Image (cartoon, rainbow, N blue to C red):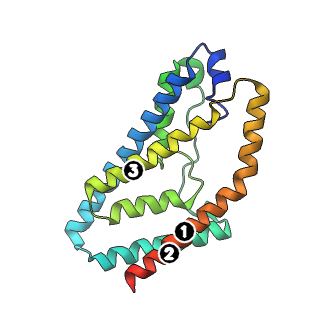
Amino acid sequence: MLSSIHPFGERSRSNSFGRTAAAHIVGSTLGGAALGVTAGAIGLAVSTLFAPSPTARTAVVLAATIGALLIEVTRRERLLPTRRRQVNENWIQNYRGWVYGGGWGAELGFGISTIITTALVHLLVVAMIIVGSFPLAVVLGATFGFVRGATILAAIGVDSPERLRLLHQRLDAMRSRSKAGVVASLLLATAFGLGGVL
C-alpha cells in the first residue's frame, strides 16, 4: 500500500494525500469492525451451543497462540489459510483517491480478504470468536483495522521518487525487527495464557 498511496503519487494523480489517507484509515477501521461483527456472531453461536468455561476459552486461545508462535518461528506461514489476491490495483487508475483509499482500506482492515502474511491475523480471529462477547469482538476488529490502516501515515513524507526509495529501504531494514517483535509478543501472550490456565 505504501508504494501506491503517498503524497508524491497522489499529487501526480491530482488527489489529496490527506483525503486519500483519511479514507484509507476510516475504511480499514470499518473493515476491521466488519471482521469483528462476523467473528463476534460466530462467537455468540459457539457460546450458545457449547457454553465454554473461562478456563476452556483461555486454553483455546493459548493453543492458538502457541501454534502462531511455532508458525512464526519456523517461518511456515504458507501452511495457514490465506487468499491469493491483494487489492485491485486498477482502482487507482479509474477512481478518485478517497474511493480507492477507502476501498483498499476496507479490504485490508477486514484482514482475511487479502493475502495474509502473519499468523497473528488468524490468532486475532480465533480470539474474537472465543472471547464470546460481540461488542468486544467488534472493538478488537476495529482496533486492528485502525492500526493496520494507520500504517499509511509512514508515507507522509514521501514527496519524491528518492524519498519513496528511502521509505522502502527503511521498511526492508525493519523486517527482521518486526518479526522479532511478533515473536516476542507471542511469547508474552503465551506466558499470560499459561498463567490463566495453570
Question: Which residue does the image show at 43% across and 34% down from the upper left?
Answer: 27
Q: Does residue 163 sit above or below 173 in this rendering?
A: above
Q: Looking at the image, can residue 67 be seen?
A: no
- Residue 128, given in percent of the width and then of the height, sits at 36, 59
**Residue at the image point whose x is 61% and y is 29% from the top:** 5
- Residue 52 percent across, percent down from the top left: 26, 75
**Label 2 to label 1, Cα distance in Å?**
6 Å
SS class of the residue under badge 3?
helix
Determine contact: label 2, label 3, CB under 8 Å: no
Q: Amino acid at mark 3?
A: Gly
Residue 121 seen anywhere in this rendered image of the structure: yes
Question: Label 3: which residue?
Answer: 141
Mark 2 and mark 1 residues within 8 Å of each other at the beta carbon: yes
Q: What residue is shown with label 2?
A: 190
- Of the image marks 1 and 3, the number of the one nearer the N terminus: 3
Q: Position of residue 171 (x, y in %)?
A: 71, 45
- 2 or 3: tag closer to the N-terminus: 3
SS assignment at label 2: helix
Circle 1: residue type: Leu
51 sits left or right of 2 in the view? left
| Residue under pointer 1 | 186
Residue at the front extreme, as displayed? 157
Above or below, comparing residue 119 to residue 92 in the picture: below
Q: Amino acid at mark 2?
A: Thr
| Front position in the image: 10 or 77 | 10
